[in-house]
Image (spheres, rainbow, N blue to C red):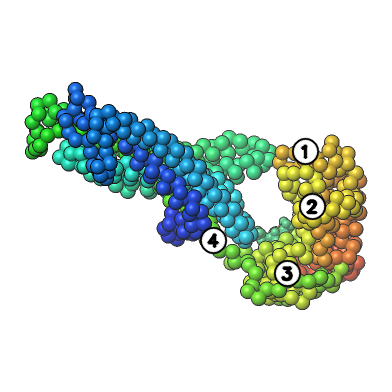
């Protein structure tokens, strides 16, 4: 992937329609009770918070003789007969209402916090696990493209964006609607004429917001892409740190990371520049609204005459409520840009999440797939042809392996040895011909039963972060402790494991002790023994190990392969001589086949290699 941000995801991401709607429809619905409670509590809390300035205004006019205009004590939606008639009673009711409103606000803010958080985090838990499960089922070609950095960014950054949106933005926008709607309703109820002056800024704010939303969207998309590119770059550089150090290309790598980081910086700034205009613009409009209310209302109150085109009277209480209310416009409105920020982020993020989820897996179980039962390990290749792209890598290969047979694959690098065996495990599907296990085409078997039947010992064994015992048990989770020890003994690893500080409970992997290549390989062999598959694929290590270790590995391998159909990608000739048959692969075809002795007698390329290697000629390779 280039730092320009192009990736295999783009096509799928662009095809995602109405991502936020999908987020709610596919995941939100399951947690709708949390959502509904949160929203209701939020609306009640915000609505209650509008009560004090309203009650204060009414009380000033009706209760206090000094400032009061002698206006009647009236509350919206409350029948007049319910209200007290004495000043003392009205004062007490006002205090009660104000204190009650604060209490209601506090209690419902708490309810809203708990339920809204539950909704957001429950939804995101589902999205994250679903996304991960779907991604795991993707085919090898997806992972061949090394998009792990971008996948990590989706599972981390994008999930966080969605979390923030569900947690904050959704409720901030509900608050915005309640506040603006509530304030407008109260102001119009109290004095529609002055309300016109106070609210005149709202359409301007709406227009500014519309402009901002349109302008900011493409910049968000560009910024998200730049994050993905930066992550991929970082992940790539760190994964290849060994190569970077040995080739002394630290500066070059730093340069590449710098470029990716700078692109991200530029795109973030491009987005923020719009914010710099939008936020102060909104503040200014809110300030204008307050100023206009103050000037017009103040003039009206001071002179007792309605200014401009206005008519009627204005009371002190109404004026106070207006001033308090117009102040309250500022906070929710100035949050519009944050809400839009989070919404745009969430839209881009959910596009990416759903885009990742919609990448189809092509290697899947057939509808009528059968589960393989007690396979004997008979493997048949019939006219198998395969290419990763246009180019043919395996060309019309046919052979049959008897149960228990060991077949060594040798050949020049790039001849197709690994590819041939990846086809057996169905990491890729053949283009032509067929591969069968115990007479079943591998495409007719369930992937689970197929892969359970085939053990794979790679050249470079991956150890998960965890203990040795956990790593050995990986894939055979029910294995008892004694079985694990048994397998480790058979793989000649019990000795070095018990010599470790905490034996089988020693942590290995990223944050644990480091093991040598030979030790790791023996753990992989033990793991395969526990799994006990009828078919085994061994990618023999080429790395130099001392002769003692090599002998130990060989002994454990002999035990492992004894009664299983085994394919060995052979680099050590000792394995080749022991194999029942040797296939010499070149350019995707089996050029020679037979036992070690037969091939020597045939005087072909194998015999030439054998002689070259046994006479110690350096670099004796099959090409
Ligand atoms: N994931 C892939 N995508 C595209 N081409 C690939 C992929 N993996 C391997 N190839 C190509 O397929 C050909 C066969 O590769 P393969 O790994 O099977 O060879 P090999 O005989 O196992 O080589 P080696 O001994 O070096 O491991 C090579 O030309 C290689 O470049």
The C terminus - image quarter:
bottom right
Would you name the residue on which mark 2 appears?
473
- Percent across and percent down for residue 568 are 81, 61
Would you name the residue on which mark 1 appears?
513
Secondary element under disc 3, as helix, strand or loop, is strand
- Whether tag 4 and tag 3 are in contact, CB under 8 A, the answer is no
Q: Is residue 542 visible?
A: no
Q: Nearer the viewer, mark 2 or mark 1?
A: 2
The one of 135 and 61 positioned closer to us in this rendering: 61
Label 4 to label 3: alpha-carbon separation: 33 Å
Q: Quadrant of residue 322?
A: top left
Q: Nearer the viewer, mark 4 or mark 2?
A: 2
The one of 297 and 493 positioned closer to us in this rendering: 297
| Chain-order first, disc 4 or disc 3 | 4
Kindly identify the residue that appears in the image at 62 percent across and 64 percent down: 388
424 relative to 115 in the view: left or right? right
The one of 561 and 43 positioned closer to us in this rendering: 43
Label 4 to label 2: alpha-carbon separation: 31 Å
Label 1 packing within 10 angstroms: few (<14), some (14-19), many (20+): few
Label 2 to label 1: alpha-carbon separation: 18 Å
Secondary element under disc 1, as helix, strand or loop, is loop
| Chain-order first, disc 2 or disc 1 | 2
Q: Quadrant of residue 499?
A: top right
As drawn, the residue found furthest toward the top would be: 66
Q: Is residue 246 visible?
A: yes
Label 4 packing within 10 angstroms: few (<14), some (14-19), many (20+): some
- Percent across and percent down for residue 209 are 30, 44
| Chain-order first, disc 4 or disc 2 | 4
Numbered tag placed on residue 589 in the rendering: 3
The one of 349 and 86 positioned closer to us in this rendering: 86
């Amino acid at each position: 992937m280039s730092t320009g941000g192009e990736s295999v995801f783009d096509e799928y991401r662009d095809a995602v329609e109405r991502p936020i709607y999908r987020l709610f429809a596919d995941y939100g619905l399951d947690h709708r009770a949390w959502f509904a409670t949160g929203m209701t509590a939020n609306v009640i809390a915000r609505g209650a918070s509008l009560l004090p300035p309203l009650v204060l205004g009414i009380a000033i006019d009706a209760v206090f003789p000094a400032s009061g205009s002698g206006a009647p004590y009236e509350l919206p939606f409350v029948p007049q007969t319910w209200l007290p008639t004495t000043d003392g009673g009205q004062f007490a009711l006002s205090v009660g209402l104000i204190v009650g409103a604060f209490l209601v606000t506090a209690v419902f803010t708490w309810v809203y916090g708990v339920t809204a958080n539950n909704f957001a985090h429950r939804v995101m838990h589902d999205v994250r696990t679903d996304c991960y499960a779907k991604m795991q089922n993707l085919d090898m070609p997806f992972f061949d493209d090394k998009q792990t950095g971008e996948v990590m960014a989706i599972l981390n950054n994008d999930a966080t964006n969605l979390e923030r949106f569900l947690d904050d933005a959704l409720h901030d926008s509900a608050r915005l609607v309640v506040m603006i709607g509530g304030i407008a309703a109260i102001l119009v109820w109290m004095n529609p004429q002055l309300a016109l002056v106070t609210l005149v800024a709202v359409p301007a704010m709406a227009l500014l917001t519309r402009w901002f939303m349109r302008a900011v969207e493409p910049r968000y998309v560009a910024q998200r892409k730049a994050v993905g590119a930066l992550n991929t770059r970082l992940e790539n550089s760190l994964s290849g740190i060994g190569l970077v150090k040995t080739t002394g290309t630290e500066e070059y790598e730093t340069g590449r990371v710098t470029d990716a980081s700078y692109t991200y910086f530029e795109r973030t700034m491009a987005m923020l520049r719009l914010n710099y205009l939008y936020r102060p613009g909104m503040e200014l409009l809110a300030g204008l609204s307050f100023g206009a209310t103050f000037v017009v209302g103040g003039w009206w109150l001071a002179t007792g005459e309605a200014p401009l085109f206005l008519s009627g009277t204005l009371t002190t209480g109404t004026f106070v409520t207006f001033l308090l209310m117009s102040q309250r416009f500022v906070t929710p409105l100035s949050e519009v840009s944050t809400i839009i920020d989070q919404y745009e982020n969430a839209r881009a993020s959910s596009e990416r999440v759903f885009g990742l989820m919609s990448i189809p897996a092509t290697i899947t179980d057939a509808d009528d797939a059968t589960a393989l039962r007690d396979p004997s390990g008979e493997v048949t290749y019939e006219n198998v042809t395969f290419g990763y792209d246009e180019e043919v890598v395996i060309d019309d290969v046919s052979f049959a392996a008897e149960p228990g047979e060991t077949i060594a694959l040798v050949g020049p690098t790039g001849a197709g040895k690994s590819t041939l065996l990846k086809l057996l495990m169905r990491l890729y599907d053949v283009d032509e011909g067929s591969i069968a296990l115990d007479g079943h085409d591998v495409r007719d078997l369930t992937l689970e039963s197929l892969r359970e039947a085939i053990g794979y010992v790679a050249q470079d064994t991956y150890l998960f972060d965890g203990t040795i015992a956990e790593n050995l048990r990986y894939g055979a989770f029910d294995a008892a402790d004694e079985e694990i020890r048994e397998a480790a003994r058979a793989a000649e690893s019990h000795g070095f494991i018990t010599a470790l500080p905490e034996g089988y409970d020693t942590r290995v992997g990223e944050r644990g002790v480091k093991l040598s290549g030979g030790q790791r390989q023996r753990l992989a062999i033990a793991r395969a023994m526990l799994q006990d598959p009828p078919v085994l694929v061994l990618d023999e290590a080429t790395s130099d190990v001392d002769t003692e270790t090599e002998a130990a590995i060989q002994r454990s391998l002999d035990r492992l392969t004894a009664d299983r159909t085994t394919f060995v990608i052979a680099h050590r000739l000792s394995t080749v001589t022991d194999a029942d048959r040797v296939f010499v692969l070149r350019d995707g075809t089996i050029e020679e086949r037979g036992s070690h002795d037969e091939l020597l007698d045939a005087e072909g390329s194998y015999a030439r290699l054998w002689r070259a290697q046994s006479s110690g000629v350096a670099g004796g390779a099959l090409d």
